[in-house]
Structures are given as C-alpha cells and as structure tokens.
Image: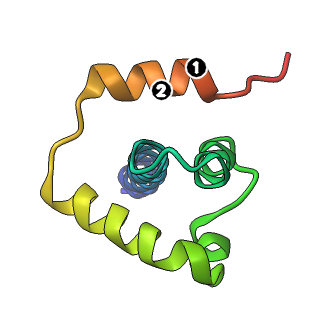
Amino acid sequence: MAKLIEEEKLNEGEDEMDKVTCLAFILYHATEDPEVRGKAVDLLNGETDLRALKADGGMLHLVETAEAVFKTQPINKEELQRFVEENLLVEA
C-alpha cells in the first residue's frame, strides 16, 4: 500500500512538471516579446515558478491564458520536445 501511495505521489510530480513544461512552451510561443520568452525559459529551467509569474502584473493574464490553452488544446509533443531540447539548461 505504501508503495502505491509513493508511486501516486511520483506521478503527481511528473504531471506537475509536464504542466509547467507545457505552460512554458505555450507562453514562449504566444508572443515574440523577448522578455516574455525569457520568463518562459526561466519557468522551464526552474529559475522562476508559476506563483512568481502570476504575481507579476504584466504576466498574470498571459499565464492564465496559457493555463486555459493547456486545459483545452492538445500540445504537439514533437514541438514541445524540440522546445525543451533547445531551451533546457542541463548542468554537468
């Protein structure tokens, strides 16, 4: 039973990570604004979080829109993977 609960928590964490990755992808492609794109990459890399972006008055509407898109429209997995490969910073 404990193992099942542990696996559920792991899956919840993966879902949250997938959500954050998708939101970063949507934000990045929603605009050509380099500041917004930079914040999307920061979100992808864990340098900021959704709470901080929502606290930024200029980003609140964009984040809420990205969340609505995430819930209602499928994401192209190949484009998402390409976005992650191009923008995710991996420390050696």
In the rendered structure, which amino acid carries the disc numbered 2?
Phe
Residue at 33% across, 69% down: 65
Q: Mark 1: few, some, or many residues within 10 Å (few <14, many ≥20)?
A: few
Res. 66 image quadrant: bottom left
Q: Is residue 35 left or right of residue 70?
A: right
Residue 55 percent coordinates (x, y):
64, 83
Quadrant of the snapshot with the N terminus: bottom left
CB under 8 Å between discs 2 and 1: yes
Q: Is residue 10 left or right of residue 73?
A: right
Q: Which residue is the site of mark 1?
A: 86
Q: Residue furthest front?
A: 32
Q: Which residue is the site of mark 2?
A: 83
Q: Nearer the viewer, residue 13 or 44?
A: 44
Residue 33 percent coordinates (x, y):
57, 50
Residue at 85% across, 15% down: 92
Q: Is residue 79 above or below residue 63?
A: above
Residue 71 percent coordinates (x, y):
20, 61
Residue 44 has which mark? none
Q: Number of numbered discs present? A: 2
Q: CA distance from mark 2 to mark 1?
A: 5 Å
Q: Nearer the viewer, residue 11 or 81?
A: 81
Residue 62 percent coordinates (x, y):
44, 68
SS assignment at label 2: helix
Residue at 16% across, 43% down: 74
SS assignment at label 1: helix
